RNA sequence: GGGCCGUUAGCGUAGCCUGGCUUAACGCGUCUCCCUGUCACGGAGAAGAUCAGGGGUUCGAAUCCCCUACGGCCCG
């Protein structure tokens, strides 16, 4: 259930509440990511103290390890990870993308002869997708190039029936269907369940994207049907969200949204964003999709983002976010601080840099987090340079505090 | 006094025997860029060395020879 409390007249910013079986979530909300049942380096007590009220867990990862049998016996994911607040679980759709072949790279597309060559790409496919050059990708292609090709090829196979995964660790095959995804999420005792979707990377031809939208809709129908069958009219039932796909193609995005609306969900997510497309498309996608979405249902922009992206999206009417950036950047020694100048409202520092070795000021004077109240830049810098695990925890606390502080402001 | 071993970026090393794919490699350190429904304490890159100094052999020397300096060890 969603309660819309206020909506800005000037912008489309909304303030509301999502009522879940594990508690109320005030929106706009940012979810820290606990893929495998833990926000890396942090305890649930840390999260509570920081002001988190909804965390994201991942169906795919928890399914493989430790498996639903273990989590069921533990009394659900809440009990297992000692987090009593609301949990949203991702369906596993994203792992089709992230564990797949080097799908996001231009090379992969050339390899599969979707486009003949990069040279001809611009000329031949310009009506379908914008040229790759002279644009700033929302996500750099190298992102997909990290693992050796030999380890990536053949990890994922998609059919209308579902998705075949190969476990990246032991190579075992697993088959995920829309129904299976719901089953797992119910076993986890998730509060917000995501329908299984297909999330193609950028660039994808319009034809292929249309097929992905069609499949996403078909899977959404199956998810809804199976969900209703399993949950029935249970009073304490979890919420079920559908995911809008369609890439950078406005008409496909709108088709996807309309089809999902027809099925009817408790909330609507916009997925397939920040998968390599130029950043300018985010705005276009939001403008195309949001007006179609009902006002009395929460809207979730999946996987985003940077602080400025979140602020912008809130003003477009988005209520929910999740992103690895604050925690991952923290683990890489990059910390958010409020800026002293006007161009941007924040800066980032690389704490391991030599210049911080003798800097005994807090990371950010204005910050009230556990790190800034108790430790110096010099100390944190030292922890990073000597690879002390405490560095990861302290930095994660700080960056999440920055994000939650931002959300707090956006809720006023 | 005699003999042996060593000296290669800020640090630690490889290459030397068997001279040329060396435009001197690697790790750490330094710096920059990147990370968007986490396979992620990760990725990409840059800067940095007259190969201790000098002389010789050679078409060609970090590499072979001689001298010097510095450091270490051994014998008197």
Image (tube, coloured by chain):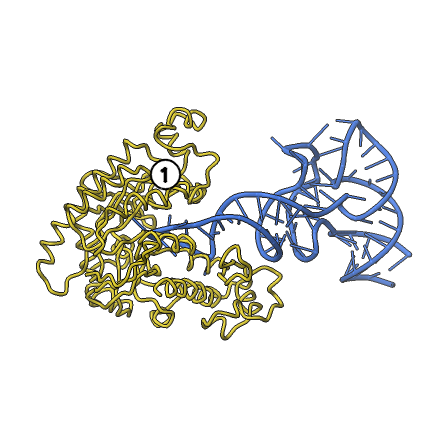
For the residue pair A6 and A305, the one nearer the viewer reads as A6
A266 left or right, relative to A147: left
> Seen from this angle, which residue lies furthest front?
A9
The residue that disc 1 covers is A202
**Mark 1 chain:** A
Please determine whether, in this image, residue A39 is positioned above or below residue A226: below
A402 left or right, relative to A350: left
Q: Mark 1 packing: few (<14 Cα in 10 Å), some, or many (20+)?
A: many
Quarter of the image where one finds residue A283:
top left
Query: Which quadrant: the N terminus of chain A?
Result: bottom left
Residue A243's x, y, as percent? 25, 48
Chain letter corresponding to the colour blue: B
Residue A65's x, y, as percent? 28, 57
Query: Which quadrant: the C terminus of chain A?
Result: bottom left
Q: Residue at 24% across / 58% down in the picture?
A: A67
Residue A20's x, y, as percent? 21, 64
Secondary structure under the numbered disc 1 in the rendered image = loop
Numbered-mark total: 1
A406 left or right, relative to B8: left
What colour do you see for chain A? Answer: yellow
Please determine whether, in this image, residue A297 is positioned above or below residue A201: below
A62 left or right, relative to A335: left
């Amino acid at each position: 259930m969603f309660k819309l409390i206020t909506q800005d007249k000037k912008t489309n910013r909304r303030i509301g509440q999502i009522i879940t079986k594990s508690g109320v979530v005030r929106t706009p909300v940012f979810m820290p990511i606990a893929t495998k049942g833990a926000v890396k380096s942090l305890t649930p007590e840390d999260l509570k103290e920081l002001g988190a009220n909804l965390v994201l867990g991942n169906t795919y990862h928890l399914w493989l390890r430790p498996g639903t049998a273990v989590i069921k016996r533990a009394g659900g994911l809440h009990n297992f990870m000692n987090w009593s607040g609301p949990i949203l679980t991702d369906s596993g759709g994203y792992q089709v993308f992230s564990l797949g072949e080097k799908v996001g790279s231009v090379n992969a597309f050339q390899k599969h002869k979707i486009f003949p060559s990069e040279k001809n790409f611009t000329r031949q496919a310009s009506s379908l997708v914008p040229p790759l050059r002279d644009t700033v990708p929302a996500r750099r292609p190298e992102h997909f190039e990290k693992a050796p090709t030999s380890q990536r090829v053949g990890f994922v196979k998609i059919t209308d029936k579902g998705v075949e995964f190969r476990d990246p660790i032991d190579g075992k095959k697993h088959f995920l269907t829309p129904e299976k995804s719901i089953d797992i999420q119910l076993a986890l005792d998730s509060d917000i369940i995501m329908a299984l979707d297909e999330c193609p990377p950028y660039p994808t031809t319009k034809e292929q994207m249309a097929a992905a939208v069609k499949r996403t809709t078909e899977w959404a129908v199956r998810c809804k049907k199976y969900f209703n069958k399993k949950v029935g009219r249970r009073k304490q039932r979890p919420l079920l969200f559908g995911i809008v796909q369609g890439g950078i193609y406005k008409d496909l995005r709108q088709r996807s949204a309309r089809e999902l609306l027809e099925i009817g969900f408790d909330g609507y997510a916009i997925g397939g964003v920040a998968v390599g497309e130029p950043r300018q498309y985010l705005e276009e996608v939001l403008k195309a999709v949001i007006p179609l979405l009902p006002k009395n249902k929460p809207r979730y922009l999946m996987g985003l983002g940077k602080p400025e992206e979140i602020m912008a999206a809130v003003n477009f009417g988005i209520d929910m976010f999740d992103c690895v950036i604050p925690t991952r950047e923290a683990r890489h020694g990059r910390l958010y601080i409020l800026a002293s100048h006007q161009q941007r409202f924040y800066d980032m520092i690389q704490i391991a840099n030599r210049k911080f070795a003798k800097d005994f000021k807090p990371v950010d004077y204005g910050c009230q987090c556990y790190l800034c109240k108790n430790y110096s830049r010099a100390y944190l810098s030292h922890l990073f340079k000597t690879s002390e695990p405490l560095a990861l925890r302290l930095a994660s606390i700080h960056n999440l505090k920055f994000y939650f502080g931002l959300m707090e402001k956006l809720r006023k």
